[in-house]
Image (cartoon, rainbow, N blue to C red):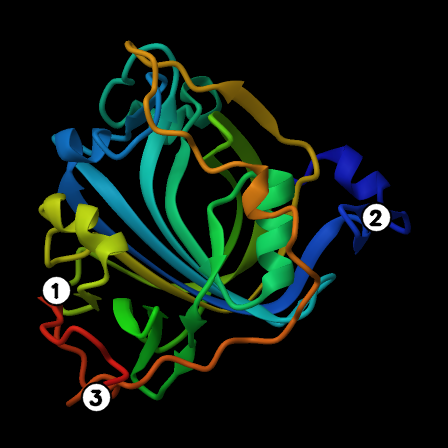
Amino acid sequence: MIPQRQKQQTGLYALVDGIPFQLPVNSEKTPALIAVFPINADRAKKLMPGKEVHPFRLWNQGLLVITVIDYQITDIGSYIEFSIAIACTHGAKPAPRLLPALFMKQYGTGQYVFDLPVSTEISVKGGKGIWGMPKHQANLDFLIGDRTVSSQYDLDGQLVMKIEVAKPAKAWFPLKLAAANYCAFRGMLMKSYIYFQGKLGFSLFKPGSARLILGDHPCIQPLKELEISPEPIFTGFFPEITGILDDHFENWFLGYDKPPKQKPEGLESVVNLGLGKEWLSPPKALPKDDDENLNNGIEKYESTSVNS
């Protein structure tokens, strides 16, 4: 699963953009949650850049993939990463239904990362500047309760999103997985690879196994047009995973039918970033929030600010 080249890097060191790495770029003792919701695939396509990234279709629906990782041990310190992504394929034409799940390499199956807030400045500098990930610093938490695992994402004093999943009785299923992330940066499509393993507890098509709360921050408004199903098709929790982020990545120019009018985010967004490992303050708990009682559904938070 892990490329031989990555294994051969063990014991080597690198210094990229002022960030020191001990190779391979890995993480240890890291809990993570995941929830996958059906969405309107045609509307999801409108959120994807260029002409070669297409929504993965499970029958007639696309998939919204929420993954939150509480990195405990990494080369750049501890931080939380809150990934909001759409399952996708890569190619000149949309892929047929279902087959990309079986032939992932052939169809370039992965996820298009729509938003990727993290806890620390150094994670933004490395993730965006090197791999082109849409990282930015935000207020995040990761809470493991007796019955639920949850994470909340605030930005500019406003709620963006909160995800809760039912905590499985046991994480028993050993899983090794390679995943591809597609991101848009500098007018290019960036593809990076991650390999991870751990024991997973999960639920399939189980009503009430997740609750997704959408805030009113402007950055989340496009997701409200995706007709997100209140019932997840999959939820999971890893009490502990280990992972390797490949230092090899690919990129292509993003092509459009007409000349783009809006300048994409570029290197100016990372060139002056430092190596800070300090976290922003945690998000403020929502009113009537109860992590011990999970009510599934898609909720819209009505207040304009969680810090008011």
Residue plotted at (33% across, 75% down): 150
Residue plotted at (26% across, 28% down): 98
**Label 3, residues with CA under 10 Å away: few <14, some 14-19, many ≥20:** few
User: Which quadrant of the view contains residue 256?
Assistant: top left
On the image, numbered disc 3 is attached to which residue? 290
Left or right: 204 in relation to 51: left
**Label 2, residues with CA under 10 Å away: few <14, some 14-19, many ≥20:** few
Mark 1–mark 2 distance (CA, rounded to whole Å): 47 Å
Tag in front: 1 or 2: 2
- What type is the residue that disc 1 sits on? Pro
On the image, numbered disc 2 is attached to which residue? 15
Tag in front: 3 or 1: 3
Tag in front: 2 or 3: 2
Residue plotted at (44% across, 67% down): 138
Q: In this picture, is 223 found above or below 298? A: above
Left or right: 27 in relation to 261: right
Left or right: 111 in relation to 80: left
Q: Secondary structure at mark 2?
A: strand
x, y percent for residue 246: 66, 40
On the image, numbered disc 1 is attached to which residue? 207
